[in-house]
Amino acid sequence: MTATTDAVPAAAPDNIVRRYYVAMAVPFAIDVVTLLVYAIINRAPEVLLPSVAIAATFLVLGVGFGGWWLIRPVARFVAGEVPFDRIEPRLAHLPRNSAILVGILYTPMMAMRVLSHRLEITFGATLDPVALPDAVASLVVGVLFNVVLTYFVINAYFDRLCEHLFRLHGANLATFNGRFRNKVALALIFLSFAGMILLAADIASYSGERLVREATVDLAITLTGAAFIYYWISHALTRPIDRLDSGMRAVADDDYSVRLPVTSNDELGHAASRFNQMVEGLSEREYLRDTFGKYVSESVASSIMGNRGRSGRATDTTAEATLMFTDIQGFTGLSERSTPTEVAAGLNAYLRIVVPVIQRHGGVVNSFIGDGLFASFNLPLPLENHATSAVCAALEIQQALASAEFAGGVKLNTRIGLNTGPVIGVTIGTDNRLSYTLLGDAVNVASRLEQLNKKFGTRILAAESTVLAAGAIDSSECLGESDVRGHKGNIVVYRIGPA
């Protein structure tokens, strides 16, 4: 891995410059095709080689020096010589500046070509003189064609370049001074009027057979140029859109690790940058939800999200529920004999047994209270036969703890209180600190029943309401009435399972 990483910076600058020169040579290659078409239609092959030689001279000298000056900052960044913020302004304007360079180079070359007959430069060919309207139109359209073509060719290269800089160097554009609509307008206006200008100049300049020949040449050149421009436009403008669409689909599939390279300095680039910011925010929210979801029950969170009122709080919900309170017997003495680290480890091990049992039976752990917990069945998570589920969960907890040993061979026994009755699920707290909880007399009774296990010497104590709702009269023992602190009147209590 290290060897590969070290090898990239040494070769990457040369490769970037080489690809840039290849992109800048595309207009030259198309120009050669245009010259070939012209020579074939005019039956003048002798003009081909000298014209190509002149174009090659402009390309090698002009692009060689001007292109090197334009791409050099990027190569220096890849080589680690300068920071990205130093070269970002030059990088953002690379397509525009490259098009301007080609326009500067092609203007004198095209002028020499269309005015060659007037300058008595015929390369030994017998060619008809070029009328001034045709010469001017050919000069303007020819130069603009190469400027537009270069702009979109370098935009396509620029897309790949920015993707490379992002993937390998973590650099992304943050300069957005271009306009997508201007790019589209540039291409549409040129493609719409270039052929019309050339044909209009032909009509104004020639007639008869000469008009047909010139119009044929211009039509063939226009169609060829339009095909090339369309090809590069589709590459330059659609790849960022496709990439953004792919990123959106990834986020829709809950993939928050996706990040997009910003490969244009217009609205599409800005959209990609905003997309990255959005996904970063979603990723942070997902992390928070995953982290704090371990502190707040997922079903409680779902209840809040699914039953929010205009205030953003969960709507108060009233229902009959079965409440469970648990507490470890002798935990205070155990804490005195053990270090805090050992106590925490033992308590976590205990909860890893108890909590899954409650959840498996459809219960929700609402809160941990020291060495105990408060769980509910049927609120906030709806559950049929909630009393039966609570009784089964209590019995399974006792069975699981009976066969479990904790650090140092310690056995942990727990006391459980069960009660069934009406409760209300509410969100309490202030604007910046909220908690979801269940309130009602039934909650208080369940808590007191857990404590009454000490009085009766039992492990699971349930109110008559729970036993009747669960249909567990035959499998439980009635212990009579008992006074419950904080509750008006006595409660008939039952022992469930072994003492």
Image (spheres, rainbow, N blue to C red):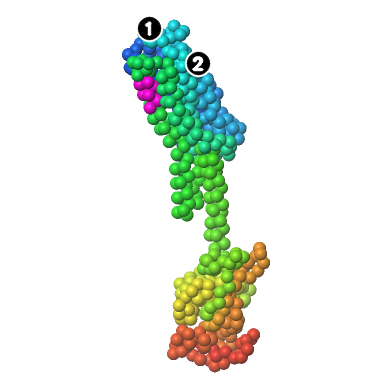
Q: Where in the figure is residue 139, as x and y percent of width and height?
A: 47, 18
Q: Where in the figure is residue 468, as x and y percent of width and height?
A: 48, 87
Image point 59% across, 32% down: which residue? 89
Indicate the amino acid at tag 2. Pro
Residue 354 visible in the displayed image: no
Task: Bin the neighbour count of mark 1 within 10 Å (Cα to Cα): few under 14, some 14-19, many 20 and up.
Answer: few
Q: Where in the figure is residue 314, as x and y percent of width and height?
A: 58, 68
Labels 2 & 1 near each other (Cβ < 8 A):
no
Task: Bin the neighbour count of mark 2 within 10 Å (Cα to Cα): few under 14, some 14-19, many 20 and up.
Answer: few
| Figure quadrant of residue 315 | bottom right
Q: Main secondary structure of the magenta part?
A: helix
Q: Which residue is mark 1?
A: 124
Q: Which residues are magenta?
A: 215-223
Q: Is residue 292 left or right of residue 404?
A: right
Image point 56% across, 35% down: which residue? 178
Along the line of sight, the residue nearer the viewer: 345 or 307: 307
Image point 63% across, 73% down: which residue? 336
Residue 108 is tagged as: 2
155 in relation to 472, above or below: above
Q: Secondary structure at mark 2?
A: helix
Indicate the amino acid at tag 1. Gly
